[in-house]
Image (cartoon, rainbow, N blue to C red):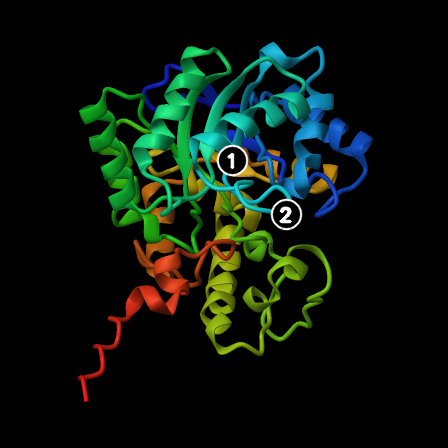
Amino acid sequence: MRYRVLGGTGIEVSVHCLGTMMFGAVGNPDHDDCVRIVHAALDQGINFVDTADMYSAGESETIVGKALRGRRDEVVLATKVHFPMGEGPNRSGNSRRWIVREVEESLRRLDTDWIDLYQVHRPDHTTDVEETLGALSDLVRAGKIRAFGCSTFPAEEIVESHHVAERRALGRFRTEQPPYSILARGIEAAVLPVCQRYGMGVLVWSPLASGFLSGRYRPGQAVDLTAGRAALTPARFDPAIAGNAAKYAAVEQLLALADEVGCTLPELAVAFTVAHPAVASAIIGPRTMEQLEGLLKGAALTLDDAVLDRIDEIVPPGVNLYQPDGAWSPRVLTDPARRRRPLPDRAAA
């Protein structure tokens, strides 16, 4: 296993990070099996584990807490806050009120006294970023978290957060966790260069494009849209949807390239993401022990310039063949009222 420093934090993390989104009701409900997967990953040299409060409504954090008993000091533990955790107002977002409350819940579920990396899962345009940074800075001083970062933030909001932190003498986002894969390269245009400029560590999610680069999905073959990753986002996998044709075509070319390299498509896909100089670690999210073992077989794989050039020909740099973040859209896009000027007052009769 290879290790890299996570941005300017001074923390060394494994190039593969164990993601636990599939632990719990959404993926693998067998807690004992999930614990074995965590232990197997640690035994293979992974020292970086990522989860979130909202994964299976907190169940993933609970499983991770069980798995790390007696091994907590070995692990750089990351979790996230933002998405709703129950019904009612003020149970989501990036406000001080919610962050200060929810970090205690994550600490309880994880059965730990501290979190190494606490991440804001998405932007919150109803909360001033100064309030968010202030709350997170206070948690660092209180010893509840060691560092904090953001996830799936656009480049302009990352820049704004650094300017606010400097002006207000607050802690700043030390990491960014964006979606990145051969099929979703949009962050190469601005997000990754911005992270490099500000010395931020980058841990990328979905290097297998939500399972599309697993090699299971081929043109002309029936796709079970009720099982596995396809059940979570069927529109991304349905061959009948015209927008998916480019992804299926790219997968065929990538499978041929993987054969030439002498590796599997998942191994090629993960190795591609960690080849970028801005990326410290790629999150792999196995649901089963078999999936973990398959991904770790390629842990030492590095891609030379010739292979990376071939990938650039298949999917050009900076191009997204699909919208990688299907879980969230900013209100400026989803709320029509935010995109339209109000109608003028009617003239007086």
Picture coordinates of residue 340 (x, y %)? 28, 71
Regarding residue 131, the answer to whether it shows in the image is yes
Picture coordinates of residue 189 (x, y %)? 26, 50
Seen from the viewer's position, the closer of residues 113 and 240 is 113
Seen from the viewer's position, the closer of residues 28 and 99 is 99
Picture coordinates of residue 2 (x, y %)? 48, 23
**Which element carries disc 1, helix, strand or loop?**
strand
Question: Image height check: is 248 above or below 189?
Answer: below
The disc, 2 or 1, on the residue closer to the chain's N-terminal end is 1
Amino acid found under the numbered disc labelled 1: Val
Residue 285 falls left or right of residue 36: left
Residue 132 falls left or right of residue 239: left
Question: Image height check: is 84 above or below 66?
Answer: below
Question: Image height check: is 331 above or below 40?
Answer: below
Q: In 3D space, how far apart are the residues under numbered discs 2 and 1 (Cα atoms)? A: 16 Å
Q: Residue furthest front?
A: 349
Regarding residue 6, the answer to whether it shows in the image is no
Residue ID for mark 2: 87
Residue ID for mark 1: 81
Amino acid found under the numbered disc labelled 2: Glu
Picture coordinates of residue 327 (x, y %)? 52, 54
Seen from the viewer's position, the closer of residues 163 and 214 is 163
Q: Quadrant of residue 287?
A: top right
Task: Look at the image and tell me in which quarter the C terminus lies.
Answer: bottom left
Residue at left offset 35%, top offset 31%? 131
